[in-house]
Structures are given as C-alpha cells and as structure tokens.
Amino acid sequence: MNDARAYHTFAVSSKVGQVLVIRNLDDLKSLHALSLAGKPWLCCGEGSNLLFVKDYDGTLVVNRLRSRRLIELDDAWVVEAAAGENWHELVRWLVSRNVGGLENLALIPGSVGAAPVQNIGAYGAEFSDFCQWVEIWDSRTQQFSRLSHAQCQFGYRSSIFKTPQMQGCIVTRVGISLSKHWQPNLSYGSLQSLDSDSVSISQVFDMICQTRTDKLPDPKKIGNAGSFFKNPIVDSFWVERFQPHYKQIPIYPLPDGTFKVAAGWLIDQCALKGFEMDGAGVHVKQALVLTNASGNASGAAIARLASYVQDKVYQKFAIKLEPEVLFIGTEGFVNPQEVLSNYAKS
Ligand code: EPU
C-alpha cells in the first residue's frame, strides 16, 4: 500500500493500493492494460476535492499530462491546456499575457482536468462560462474524443464527468475560449469597490488572490478541500419561514424562482466556526471549509465532523447540506450522503 497524502490536499493518513502517474501516451497504455485486466482504478488531478474515508484498494491514477497553447483568433483567444496542468498557474500565465476572463477563478487549488469535472466556480464566474470543449480518453477503446460545451452538461459544481456514463474515461485536455473584448466581472462583494472603466486584468487577479488568501486556508499548510458542502437551494416557503428571524441571511434568487443560501453562513449560525472533533475542524474564517486541523485527522474523522455539522444545520434550519467533496472508500467512489448518514446513526 502507498501513502495517499502526497496525492490529495486533505492530507489524511489513508493508503492506496497502487499509484500510476500518467505523463505521456505510454503511461496511458498502462492504464489501458489495467482496464483490460478489470482492475479497479480511479483518476485524480491534484486531489483538491477528494476525501479518502478509508484506504483505497485499487490504483490511483494521477493525471500529470502537461501542455498549454494559446491560439489567437480575430475576436478571441483559445487556450488548449492538458489536464495535468495546475489551474492557478494557467490563470496566472494568461493574466501575465494580458489575456482576461479567468482571473476570477485564480487560486482555485487543483488541476485543469478537474475544472470541467467539478465545474469550478468562484466570485461570480465558473468554468462553464469559458469552456469550448473537453477532450477525454477512453481507457477501454484507447480512443480520444471531444465533448462540446452542451455535451458536458454543466451545472452547479456538476457535469457529465461525474456520472457513471464517463466510467473508464479520463479528461485529457480542455479548450477554453476567452473574448478579446474583456469586461471585468465585478459582481461579487469586495470586487465592487473596483472601477469597471479603469480596472486592469491583473488588478482583478490580485484582488481575488488577496480575498482568497485572507479567507481560505492554504492546503499546503492546513489540509482541506475548499468548500466541503454545496450551497443549498431552497424554495420560497423556506425563505418565508426563516427570513423574518434572520434578516442578514445571504440568499441569492435563482431564475427558476428558487433561492441559493450560503451554507457557510448556516454553519456559522450554529456557532461551529473553529469547532474541532478528533483532529478535524471547521475553519475559523470560513465555516464552509472543513480542515485537517491537527494534521493527523483520519478521513473518517473528517466525515464524522461533516455529519455532525450536517446534523446541527438540519436541526436549526431544516436543510440537509450536501457534500461538494467526492468521497473515496475501499473500492472507489462512494455516495457521500450514505457515508454521512451512517456516521449520524453511529
Ligand atoms: N458566510 C458567513 N460565515 C462563514 C462563511 C460565509 O457568514 O463562515 C457568509 C459570507 O459573509 C457571505 C456568504 O456567507 O455573505 C457567502 O460566503 P462566501 O462569499 O465566502 O462564499 P461561499 O458561498 O461560502 C462560494 C464557493 C467558493 C467560492 C466563493 C466565492 C460554493 C460551495 N463555494 O462559497 O468556492 O470561492 O463562493 O465565490 O459554491 C469551493 O468550491 O471550494 C470554493 C471555495
């Protein structure tokens, strides 16, 4: 068994059966051999959205395919980037060339290949706003194919790449389209202080980096996987019931008449900021982020804490928070909700 610490940002002490690092086409052949032999494997980038709740018996396939290319068209830039590139480095590279669009997504931990899987988002922007296509490789047929934006079925932190349909496939490359007529996206809180007529791409980038650094723990220093839960969607009955009691509740109306509520605020209202259990903690500055506070927490301890947080929020607000992070058990991905329900019973 191999230590999984080096391959995910929660840095829990779980083990994995084998590790296969994919750097080139030859490595992809090894993955094909694994698939043909019916051996279990799962693919990760930088593991910034994973929780190993137990030791994983199969092979962890680590995508380190590298390459980036910037193509100039009349009205837009097209960026082609391999899945193993670091997301933030790609954003920084574009900003240094004065190519705008992705700056609101700066400092999101993880690889380029994870961006479409999770449809990463922050500060009023998400990956799907810029994605043109996603290239995948099927480990059984060894064929590459491209999915168009529509075929990716992007949603809030979701895409086709999270569904069983994509079993056996890995993301190898993405195509991103960035308009040359850059408009700053200053819709989010602190960004509104910037002047949209004069602000530069690098100023927005710097402010995003500063905001994230101020609020979110650096996974290199304290293990975490960003937001642990998704922001829940509620209906107007819920709003009518709770808003009169909590005037400050951060609620965002959605086009279909429902509302998104800030999960971090809900957890914060349960007075859980800084709360710790078995070495796992709720981050002191952003309650939506659970951390490996002691550095020695097990994946099970993080899941236990998540179940505790879920329960507290449910008792106070009648909302069952849904994990955003993907859970890995002995045989592969497991349903996070089932794992947390089991801890709630125990
Ligand atoms: N809030 C609190 N207490 C807290 C945390 C948040 O009161 O402990 C309040 C804030 O004051 C604010 C609201 O809740 O009014 C929303 O908080 P924030 O702006 O920090 O954003 P978020 O909804 O908690 C989402 C994304 C983040 C992304 C930020 C910024 C999800 C699940 N998370 O968090 O993404 O960086 O918006 O756009 O949608 C991630 O996915 O890993 C991630 C970090």
Image (cartoon, rainbow, N blue to C red):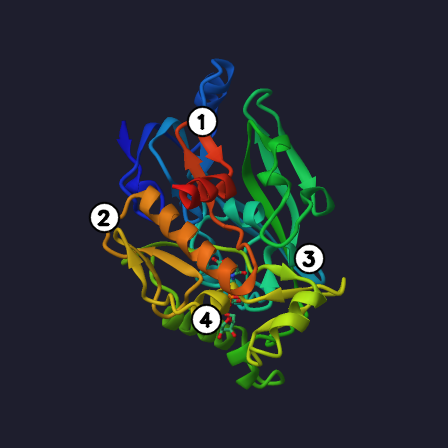
* Front residue of this view, candidates 329 and 167: 329
User: Mark 1 is on which residue type?
Assistant: Trp
Q: Position of residue 275 (x, y in %)?
A: 32, 63
**Circle 2 — which element?**
loop
| Mark 4 or 2: the one toward you | 4
Q: Does any atom of ligand 1 lie closer than 8 Å to the CB of label 1?
A: no
Mark 4 or mark 2, earlier in chain: 4
Residue 269's label in the rendered image is 4
Pair 1/4: label in front: 4
Q: Residue at x 66, y 37 (%)?
A: 146
Residue to which mark 3 is pinned: 73
Camera-side mark, 3 or 1: 1
Instruction: Give the structural element (helix, strand or loop) at label 3.
Output: loop
Q: Residue 66's quadrant in the figure?
A: top left
Badge 2 density bin: few <14, some 14–19, many ≥20, Cα 10 Å: some
Which is more toward the observer, 70 or 194?
Answer: 194
Mark pair 1, 4: CA separation: 40 Å
Q: CA distance from mark 3 to mark 1?
A: 39 Å
Q: Earlier in the sequence, mark 2 or mark 3?
A: 3
Disc 3 or 1, which lies upstream in sequence?
1
Residue at mark 2? 296
* Label 4 near ligand 1 (CB < 8 Å): yes
Residue 186 seen in render: yes
Amino acid type, mark 2? Asn
Residue pictured at 56% horizontal, 60% vertical = 318
Q: Which residue is mark 1?
A: 41
Q: Nearer the viewer, mark 4 or mark 3?
A: 4
